[in-house]
Amino acid sequence: MDRILGLRKRRSGEVARKRLKLLLVVDKTGCSPELLEMLKSDICRVISRYLEVEPGKMEVGIRKTSFCGSEDTIPALYAYIPIHSLIYKGML
């Protein structure tokens, strides 16, 4: 029934894969999981002032990426933020 409704439980392999990715990011960038959670919380709080978002499905992380076509890589912050509604919640 959950599959029909689009709901599914996370499998232990998926959870382990996410944890491993987080550990690799922490190791490569020196950014702690606590800092990433604080960033996620702050980003969610600010964006929620303007849009309805799904905080439980948000992902925030740091990746190594090239900058302006350079061969060198730098850490870059990325965020995946599912938007529940595009209705502007601020004052008009």
Image (cartoon, rainbow, N blue to C red):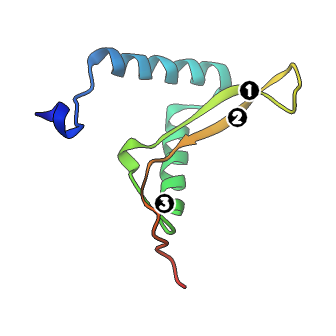
Marks 1 & 2, CB-CB < 8 Å contact: yes
x and y percentages locating residue 4 in the rendered image: 17, 35
Q: Mark 1 points at which residue?
A: 65
Where residue 49 appears, as percent x and y from the top left, is: 49, 68
The part of the image, by quadrant, that contains residue 56 is: top left
Front residue of this view, candidates 70 and 24? 70
* Discs 2, 3 touching: Cβ within 8 Å: no
Which residue is pictured at 28% across the width and 17% down the height? Answer: 12
Q: Where is residue 8 in the image (x, y as percent from the top left)?
A: 22, 31
Residue marked by disc 3: 45
> Residue drawn 65% across and 28% down?
63
Q: Which of marks 2 and 3 is nearer the N terminus?
A: 3
Q: Residue furthest bottom?
A: 92
Q: What element carries label 1?
A: strand
Q: Residue 39 carries which label?
A: none
Above or below for 12 versus 30: above
How dense is the environment of label 2, judged by Cα within 10 Å: few (below 14), some, or many (20 and up)?
few
List the residue tagged with mark 2.
76
Q: Badge 3, how many Cα within 10 Å: few under 14, some, many 20+?
A: few
